Image: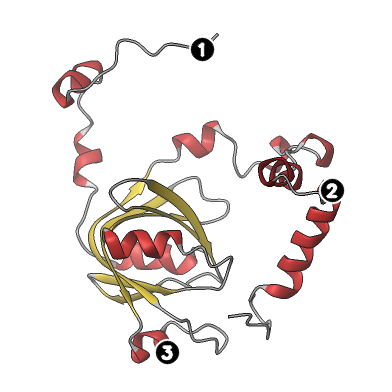
Amino acid sequence: MEQQVTSTVDDVGALRTIYREPAQMVIDKVIDHVDDGVRSFIGASPMVILATGDGRRNDASPRGGPAGFVRVLDEHRIAFGDLVGNNRIDSYQNLVANPGIGMLFLVPGVVETLRVNGVATVSHDPALREGCAIDGRVPKVVIVVDVEECYIHCGASFTRGAVWDTNTWLSGDERPVPSAIIREHTGTEATAEQIRTGLQEYYDTAIWHVGGNNDPG
């Protein structure tokens, strides 16, 4: 039986009555520029989650690279180049339509994360592309973010989820099987094992990675 959703909250004032006011430190920790602490966190981060939307649909997408692949241009701007993937370019299309962006920077082993919110520009400026090159690979486009807010997000969720505690990680036979999910969603005749093998080959040989020479375009 379908679960009915009732008692919805559709007013910000009503929502605030459910929660106490945040502590002053939670408010004061938000800054509007890249200081030395923010710069060091970004420089140590090999993974950032992008939140974008085109006004109709919203999207969250991971971006990874060697630590520091997101560059600090100055105290108000950061930038990163595209690293070739599946060419869906959902995030980039969203940013062309609606430049608002949220970024969540992760550092392995650190339960706190860094949140950066701002306005993004998709650029193919040659100098910017050269400046965001990694291992000599020049990206096709660069995303430049004008920083409006940045702050450290507390580690409550990562602590509750024990994200970095390897003792909580599922064993191989307990984990979800992405290749089986892909098979079901696409209706392909390929087996889950064939899809898994193809994905691994793609990861090993078809995508750019640190120290690799491949660039499928």
Q: Nearer the viewer, residue 216 or 211?
A: 216
The crowd level at tag 2 (other Cα within 10 Å; few <14, some 14-19, many 20+) is few
Quadrant that contains the C terminus: bottom right
Q: Secondary structure at mark 1?
A: loop
Question: Left or right of 133: which side holds 216?
Answer: right
Q: Secondary structure at mark 2?
A: loop
Q: Secondary structure at mark 3?
A: helix
Foreground tag (1 vs 3): 1
Q: Does 6 sit above or below residue 97? A: above
User: Where residue 191 appears, x then y in whole percent?
Assistant: 84, 48
- Can you name the residue that lies furthest to the left here? 13
Q: Amino acid at mark 2?
A: Thr
Cα separation, mark 1 vs mark 3, equals 53 Å
Residue with the mark numbered 2: 191
Q: Does 177 sit above or below residue 139? A: above
Q: Residue at x 31, y 53 (%)?
A: 54
Residue with the mark numbered 3: 130
Cα separation, mark 2 vs mark 3, equals 42 Å
